[in-house]
Image (tube, grey):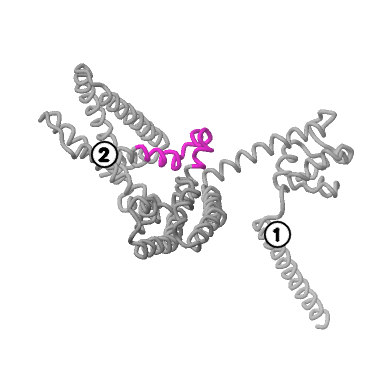
Amino acid sequence: MAVLEASQSRLQNWAKSTSYELLNAAFIVFNVVFIIMETDLRAKFVASTSPSGYEDDEKDKIYFVLGSSVFGAVFVLDLLLRIHVERSQFLKSREKGWNVFDIVVVSTAVVEVIVQWYELSSGTTSHATAFLRKFSMLRIVRLLRVISHTRAVRVIRFIRELRLMVFSLTGTLKSLTWAIVLMVIILLVFGVFFTDGVVTHLVQNPSLSTNTTEDLRLHFGTLSQATVSLYMAMSGGEDWGNLFRVLQPLPREYQGAFLVFITFAILALLNVVTAVFVEAAMQVSQNDKQLVVMEEMESKGEFIAMMQQVFEELDTNDSGALSLEEFEKHIEDEKLTAFLSSFGLDVGEVRTLFTLLDVDRTGEVDLEEFVSGCLRLKGGAKSLDMAILKYQVEFILHNIQDSGKKIDDLINRGSFEAGA
């Protein structure tokens, strides 16, 4: 049992390691390239009419079925391994949506491979293959998970901007859903209005020929057609001037309502939806802990490098330490003062600043004290700083009160003994 538990523990650690994550990501990327090549060759075969093209396609088909089988087996093993490691948390964790997506993708891939082998063995074709090929697009979508959920620091630095865009895009799906609901409601409101106007116009004028009312029937003859036409007008799929001319046979209030719709949709609706998307994307990007930590580390590294450069400029005698005289002499430089102020370092009180930097009270500030002190004093006071200060003040007050009580007890005891 101990050996079994140890092997399971090693398996779990390996499944959660960065190396396994990179290996899995590599297979997903290779699978995407494989799907692209297969689709391109199938398209070239359809465009070719020569008999040799058919023979080449039969050979390529065997190779592609073998490749699909290999990728399918790898993804099945990966899915089973993650289910074994995460167990009940597989469908309860924060990534449960992606896990369900992986189950669907892997299942369709396995079924597609089975159908392809059946067609090769029987020499027949079926509609199931055409249907299952539609799910190959989902395997390409898995790239988004690789980009947004990678934990390798070097990879994150390399694809940081791409990761940020993917993370923001996937995080705005909820906003997209509600934006679609809002647009559908508005399109239905105006669609009902214009469809009713067209139907009323056709009923009141039965003598009109079909050719005369063809455009009206095509764009606003039914509610679905009117909704699609309005959506095309607001999104650029159709020039709204053409639709405006289509409504000319109707009373003028319908043309006015169409202008109101275009104005409202372009200037208000689309701008509001865009603003909501931008706000949601910014919030999602700020919640990416790995990106926040990385940016903080890079910012800290850049700040340390700059403070080291400032220290070298202040230390004119290359002694490796700054005295109070050197500090006062060079800190009066306006450029240096403005540079330090840009990082939130107030250099107005030179002696106070030097005292805070001189932690060991030697009268000199070395490079380590200067850099660590500037890091500590950078920016405004944080809640943690205030909590530490409050704790220290309360600790001092408590000690002073205890000391006062002890002094009072000693004084009272001495008075009692003197009286006795």
Q: Quadrant of the N terminus?
A: top left
Q: Does the magenta-highlighted stretch encompass residue 70?
A: no
Q: Is residue 411 left or right of residue 6?
A: right
Magenta stretch bounds: 140-165
Residue 407 is situated, as x and y percent measured from the top left of the image, at 78, 71
The outermost residue toward the bottom is 420
Report helix, strand or loop for mark 1.
Answer: helix
Give the main secondary structure of the magenta stretch.
Answer: helix
**Residue shown at the point (75%, 75%) measured from the top left:** 409
Residue 242 position within the rendered picture, expressed as x and y whole percent measured from the top left: 47, 48
- Alpha carbon of mark 2 to alpha carbon of mark 1: how far? 56 Å
Which label number is shown at residue 76?
Answer: 2
Q: Quarter of the image containing the C terminus?
A: bottom right
Q: With respect to residue 207, does 116 lie above or below?
A: above
Q: Amino acid at mark 1?
A: Leu
How packed mark 1 is, by other alpha carbons closer than 10 Å (few <14, some 14-19, many 20 or more), is few
Q: Nearer the viewer, mark 2 or mark 1?
A: 2
Indicate the quadrant where residue 383 lies: bottom right
User: Residue 98 placed where, x, y %?
Assistant: 36, 47
Circle on res. 389:
1
Q: In front: 62, or 370?
A: 62
Between 397 and 122, the one nearer to me in the picture: 122
Camera sees residue 338: yes
First in sequence: mark 2 vs mark 1: 2
* Residue 148 lies within the magenta run: yes
Picture quadrant of residue 82: top left
User: The residue under label 2 is which amino acid type?
Assistant: Val
Residue 63 appears at what percent x and percent y?
23, 24
Residue at figure coordinates x 30%, y 39% from the top left: 78
State the residue at coordinates (28%, 24%): 47
